[in-house]
Image: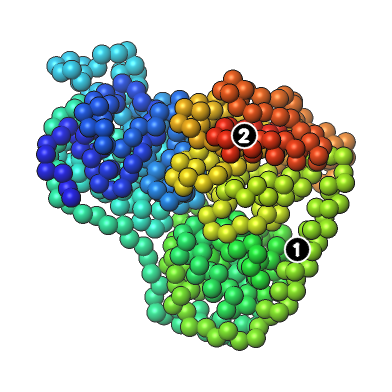
Amino acid sequence: MEQTTTRSSAGLILSLLKEEGVDKIFMVSGTDYASFIEEKVRDPSLPDFVVVPHEITASAMALGYSLGGKMGVVAVHTVPGTLNALGIVSNAYTSRIPLLVLAGRSPYTEEGSTASRNLRIHWTQEARDQGEFGRQYLKWDFEIRDPTQTSVALRRALQIARSEPRGPVYLTIPREVSVKEAKPSNVKMSPYEPGPSRESLREAEKLVEESERPAIITWRGGRRREWYEAITEFANKLGAPVLNYVGEVVNYPSGGPMALDKLDMKEPDLVIVIESEVPWIPKRVKVKAPVIRIDVEPSYSYIPYYGFPCDVCIQSTPMALKEMQIRGKDRWSEEIRERVEKQREYKRKEIGNLENSSRVHPRLLSSYVSQLGAIVVNEYPFNPRYGSFEYGEYYADLAEGYLGWALGAGLGIRMATGRDVVITTGDGSFIFGVPEAFYYVASTYGLPAMVVIYDNSGWLASAEAVEEVFPEGLAKAKRMFPGADFKRYNIGETVKAFGGYFRLAETPEEARSALTEGWNNVKKGGLSVVQVVVERTR
């Protein structure tokens, strides 16, 4: 029920968040949060503050909390905190993850109240338009200018963040406003989502009925359980292969009969694209078949130049699949089943061969990691085709590509779900994730987790770009990539300062042993980092 007592604006925000089901706020506080801290002391039942010593880690934890099924809220300090968090915010925006960013603002006044400016930075940290910093990657931003706006502003922020396409919102609270009394207003604002038109469904049904070799391409169609189940049921009934069955999330079970790794796109006579902004790379792949797109925002209007075809665009969640009337006729399902079984047999043999090598191949390490049976939070190197996943067991490759999110997100997912988590990163992205802040939070709040570093001593994507842009170049011929090399250190060993387990592995046998030891430590409630020297390939 809406609060009826009068609180400060900060207290009202906290009480409304509690009412909306928010139980934690990931916080890097500053002088702007005095009133929030005071209110929490007065009422310990308000959402807990999870204190995190860096905004990248804090915002990534909030992002992971949302991925884990709860509403992620992060509180940052004025302009510096906002700037530090923006990379993670851009990931949330492009990958459609709900996120509420609370930010303080330098006090308006120079004197006259206890909330007025009392530090030098209160002048230097004032921006002409603080919301402008992240506006390209925010669904909405607003500064509360008067305490009477508090209820509506907070409700509206949550409504917009939770509505499809979901994403981050930004709410600024000046210190003078936060300390003033604010009466709640009885306003309800429920989230919403688009639905298909009957006309678009009929057009799609006609194309599906006429097809003999349909294929499904998705990337994050499984980001909600009901979507995952709708795609699984539709693909099995249609007999259509699912490409990217594990993409940014698990879209279709790895063990399903339609879980195909690759397909010559000249084969399908119909392509159904579900929640995927880049279904293929046009300079490498030519698609001549008709394309049906099912997406909460099929045009991806935030991308300035975008030329992917859409013969039938259905602006809807993947639940539109439930409304499509299709017959489960004999298409090419048996052929796909045979291909899927052959690819599984090939991978089994491949892993067996890789185990006999003296070096660790990234695909072999991916197979080892998947056998731990934990949620995998992957930042770049792990190959999900060498694991077995169902809904909610894998998160990766956030669309904006801002690195450094996986360490914090893994802890956020762990905190939201209570399930075991293993975080896989490259050697570079591990450093981007601010490891010491990660260790601090994991140790302070008792969040056992394991990090597996795929150490290839370089920026692999940069080296591959050189090879593609200059296929006959000297860099490729000499296997020299100045600017893409990365000197090796035992970067994961810093976990020992926080009482954690560390081991460096260079052979398959050492990798298996290190993963077993590290995982046993996690099961005892500890923090583990295993750094594996891998071949410089995917």
Mark toward the viewer: 1 or 2: 2
Q: Is residue 326 visible?
A: yes
Residues at marks 1 and 2 touching, judged by CB atoms closer than 8 Å: no
Looking at the image, is mark 1 or mark 2 earlier in the sequence? 1
Which amino acid, by three-letter code, is at mark 1?
Answer: Arg
Instruction: Return the residue nearer the eye: 380 or 46.
Output: 46
Q: Position of residue 159 (x, y in %)?
A: 30, 52
Q: Position of residue 160 (x, y in %)?
A: 33, 51
Instruction: Return the residue nearer the eye: 221 or 122.
Output: 221
Q: From this view, report whether residue 172 is shown above or below residue 175.
A: below
Q: Residues within 10 Å of mark 2 (few under 14, many from 20)?
A: some
Q: Position of residue 21 (x, y in %)?
A: 31, 47
Q: Residue at x 43, y 40 (%)?
A: 62
Q: Residues within 10 Å of mark 1 (few under 14, many from 20)?
A: some
Instruction: Return the residue nearer the eye: 510 or 3.
Output: 510
Q: From this view, report whether residue 341 is shown above or below residue 152.
A: below
- The residue positioned farthest toward the front in the image shown: 524
Which amino acid, by three-letter code, is at mark 2?
Answer: Asn
Counting the numbered discs, the total is 2
Mark 1 and mark 2: span between their CA atoms?
A: 32 Å
Instruction: Return the residue nearer the eye: 182 or 349.
Output: 349
Q: Residue at x 56, y 61 (%)?
A: 251
Determine the secondary structure under disc 1. Answer: helix
Q: Residue at x 32, y 24 (%)?
A: 126
The color scheme shown is rainbow
Q: Which disc, if any, is residue 344?
A: 1
Q: Which residue is disc 2 drawn over?
A: 521
Q: Position of residue 183 (x, y in %)?
A: 12, 39
Q: Is residue 538 visible?
A: no
